[in-house]
Image (spheres, rainbow, N blue to C red):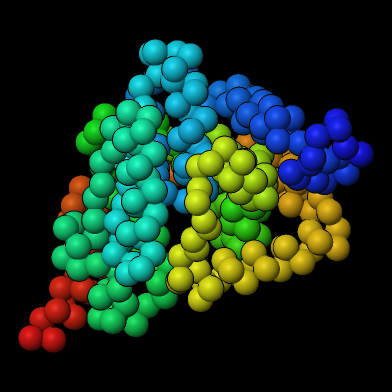
Amino acid sequence: MNCCSNKPVIGLIAGEKLCKAHFIEYFESKVFKTIRQFDLIGKEEHLGVALSGGKDSLTLLHLLSKLSKQNPKIKLTAIAINEGIHGYRDKTLAAAEKFCKKNSVPLHIYSYEEEFGMPLDNMLKALDVKPCTICGIFRRYLLNKKSRELGFTKLATGHNLDDEAQSIVMNEFKNNVQASARLGPKAGINSNKKFVQRIKPLYLCTEKEVTVYAFVNGLLDNFNECPNVAKSYRAQVRDMLNNFENENPGTKYAIINSFLQILPDLKKRFKGEQADYCKSCGEPAAKDKCNACIFAERLEKAKLRAV
């Protein structure tokens, strides 16, 4: 059923087809309702926005910019990580810089090469490791450390419903209950002064909805996907869930809704675990040495062997 006589731009799971104007209204209402429902943003915040220059992060920053203009006590600063993926990250960072300049949003960019001595492409040549494994570890490390140094009260990320459903299923398949406890609209378990609270305002928005919103609002000229994604375990789970969704519409929503029912118990179960600090760098860690330092040391050894 069409919402009106105007040309539809998207069809929803319930069967309704929305035109551009009604879809934008629907999407923005959903995001701002999510923020209220899960108490993601307070009346006075310095929000960091993890910005890659892709559809999710640009959509997120676009919406939070609207929110910030309505409430001057909500300050926005974008933070981007240049992993050093040739032919990909330079394009998305250009989109990020263009958006921030146009909308007067401060942008801080940090690179693997400056922080860890080499770009990701070189790391993958030096070490026998899956791209998403080492990239994810270094990316999370830098985002948290730099967010704290920049004084963010929270860090907003562009994770959408599809991303979360994939993470839930991946953790189930790997029997990693504690990792699932760190998921949700507000990520993390322990309150730790060195952890910056991460929030996901796009939590209930599907990837399809985010993509359409980005394009109808002119936030993207084209869609770029990281070339390493196809090699990942997540890509396998993503394809599986997409097949389920095609055959059984609403599958991803069902995964999220059932997960939200058990999430409070999961967080309660692991809440008492003592947060520790890395003895090498002082950043939060689950053991004596954080994964970022472990990989950094492996890279140093690889460089010495290459000399």
Left or right relative to 86: residue 254? right
Return the x and y of residue 209 as percentages of the image width and height: 67, 44
Which of the 4 image quadrants contains residue 261? top right
Which residue in the rendered view is the most extreme toward the right? 1
Return the x and y of residue 224 as percentages of the image width and height: 49, 61
Which of the 4 image quadrants contains residue 126? bottom left
Up-down: is 127 above or below 98?
below
Which residue in the rendered view is the most extreme toward the front? 6
Q: Nearer the viewer, residue 296 or 29?
A: 29
**Residue at 51% across / 76% down in the picture?**
231
Which residue in the rendered view is the most extreme toward the left? 307
**Residue at 39% across / 43% down in the picture?**
50
Left or right relative to 92: residue 14? right
Up-down: is 263 above or below 166?
above
Return the x and y of residue 193 as percentages of the image width and height: 31, 33
Quarter holding the C terminus is: bottom left
Left or right relative to 55: residue 129? left
Which of the 4 image quadrants contains residue 145? top left
Q: Is residue 151 visible?
A: yes
Quarter holding the N terminus is: top right
Return the x and y of residue 123 as percentages of the image width and height: 27, 74
Q: Nearer the viewer, residue 173 or 42?
A: 42
Q: Is residue 274 visible?
A: no
**Residue at 60% across / 22% down in the picture?**
36
Up-down: is 175 above or below 185?
below
Q: How many numbered callouts?
A: 0
**Residue at 50% across / 51% down in the picture?**
221
